Structure formats: C-alpha cells, structure tokens
Image: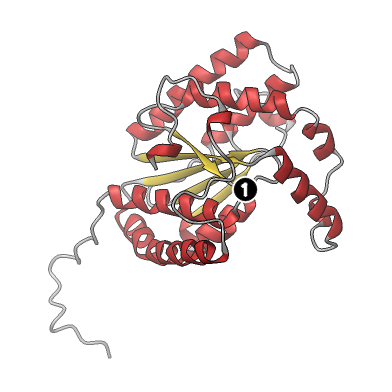
Amino acid sequence: MKRYRVKSGAKLSLKQYDPDDTGEYKKSDQGKEKAKAETAKLIAGLEGLQERLYANATRSLLIVLQGMDTSGKDGTIKSVMSGINPQGCKVAAFKAPSKDELARDFLWRIHREVPPKGYIGIFNRSHYEDVLITRVHGWVSEKVAKCRLDQIKEFEELLTENGTTVLKFFLHISKEEQKKRLEARIADPEKRWKWSSGDLEERKLWDEYQKAFEEVLSATSTMRTPWYVVPANRKWYRNLIVAERVVDALEEMNLKTPPAPEGVDFTKLRIV
C-alpha cells in the first residue's frame, strides 16, 4: 500500500499516480481473474474480523470514500463490503446540507454519523465536500477553507484518539474513463436513474477539481489518518486495493474473541 499512500506533509500531484495502474497484475483477463480471486479471499475474511470488532465493542472503523463523479464509490461499497454483516455497518451519504445543518458548524452533521464502537462506518462523500465543491465554486473564501482543513485534521485526530481507525480513499479515475462511464449511463436504461444534468456542468470543472483534491489530500494526509490514492480505472483492481487495506486495518486492531461469561461451566450446560 505504500505506493498509494500520500506522505504526511508532502505536496501532491495527481499526475504522479496512474489511474490505469494495476500493480503486479497484468491488464489482461488472466490478471483480472487473479486479482478478483484474491479480493474474494479478503472479503471472505472480513466476516470474522467484523464479528470480533462487534463483539469487543472497544474500537470502530470509519472508511471515507472520495472521488470524481463515476469514480466508483457506490461500486466499492457494494463489492468490498459484501462480506460483512449489514447489522454492524452504517453507510452515510452526504448531499447538499439542509437548512437545519447550515445553521450549525459544518462538522455537526458529520460527527452524528461517526460509527459507534463495534461498528464499521462508511462515508460516501464526506466532510471533505465542504473544502472541495465549496472551493471550486467559490462559495467559501480561501481563509475559511484553510480553517476548515485544520478543523478536519483536529476532528480526525479526535476520532483516532477515541478508538476509531480512519481510512481515507481517493478513487482516482482519468477524464477519459469518466467520459466512458457517463456515456454508459446514458446508453443503459437500467442506469439512467443515476443521470443528472449537473454531471456535465461539474465535468467542465475537471481541472479545478483536480487541483482542489491535490491541495486537500496534501493538507490532510497525516501519519495517523493518511490518504490513499487508489487507481480506479479498473474496477477489479480498485476493489482489491480497498479490500486489502480494510482487512489490514482490522487485523492491526489485534482484537480477540471475548472470553465467555465467568461462573458458567459450559461442559455441564444442557439446553432442555
């Protein structure tokens, strides 16, 4: 994962990362099938790891997914999280803030969705929207944006100090790949419900968004809550990278199965 991790304090250029990268797996049917088989193993292992997380109820995991439109946030959740029990997982998607939310600080609605101990939480877009779309469209000043970046780092530090592991993934696709996916959305009647005329307007701001992401990822990738730039042109490789890091994070918690209740002799226990 080191090759995709954004170093703390380092200035980032997304041109350093190839969105079509597939690591050691060849861009062929053979490489694809090999990667998908490895991903399936990782997903299968999630069930036991999640169960220990839930049973201990001392730690939690927050997964943050960001990326351009069509980068695969929904697909990542559907694929990688297929191996977990939905009772112990909560997904939050952040759209434009409501009037009630705008009346409070920008992190108020975010903090309410942070997973409790024992749970996995997934943010489909996140608190980072308030330093991305707002900056690109000029809805906040640079002074406000910089202040929010500092507050985000402090917020994530607060979470980690209280037992929440934060994983942040930027799903990196090329402009050409986005074009293909938008065209596929138009062509497929089963996908047209996802279409929004705003997608084309936002696409016109591609370069501005790339610059904004570079600045945000550089400013908020820390030792404890780093960003990972995930090559996402190939969905099968994207899923592998995310699944691998999620499994590693849960294993790093080193959680054991809790002991049985004291004072019960299970060898003599009989159910009638």
Label 1, secondary structure: give it: loop
Q: Residues within 10 Å of mark 1 (few under 14, many from 20)?
A: many
Q: Is residue 259 above or below residue 92?
A: below
State the residue in front, 213 or 4: 4
Q: Is residue 66 above or below residue 213?
A: below
Picture residue at 74% right of the left edge, 18% below the top:
139
Q: Quadrant of residue 231?
A: top right
Residue 130: horizontal and vertical position, in percent? Answer: 63, 26
Residue 216: horizontal and vertical position, in percent? Answer: 55, 24
State the residue in front, 256 or 202: 202
Q: Quadrant of residue 146?
A: top right
**Residue at the extreme bottom:** 272
Q: Quadrant of residue 138?
A: top right
Residue 84 visible somewhere in the drawing: no
Picture residue at 53% right of the left edge, 35% below the top:
17
What residue does disc 1 label?
233
Picture residue at 54% right of the left edge, 51% below the top:
238
Residue 117: horizontal and vertical position, in percent? Answer: 38, 47
Residue 42 visible somewhere in the drawing: yes
State the residue in front, 181 or 94: 181
State the residue in front, 269 or 240: 240
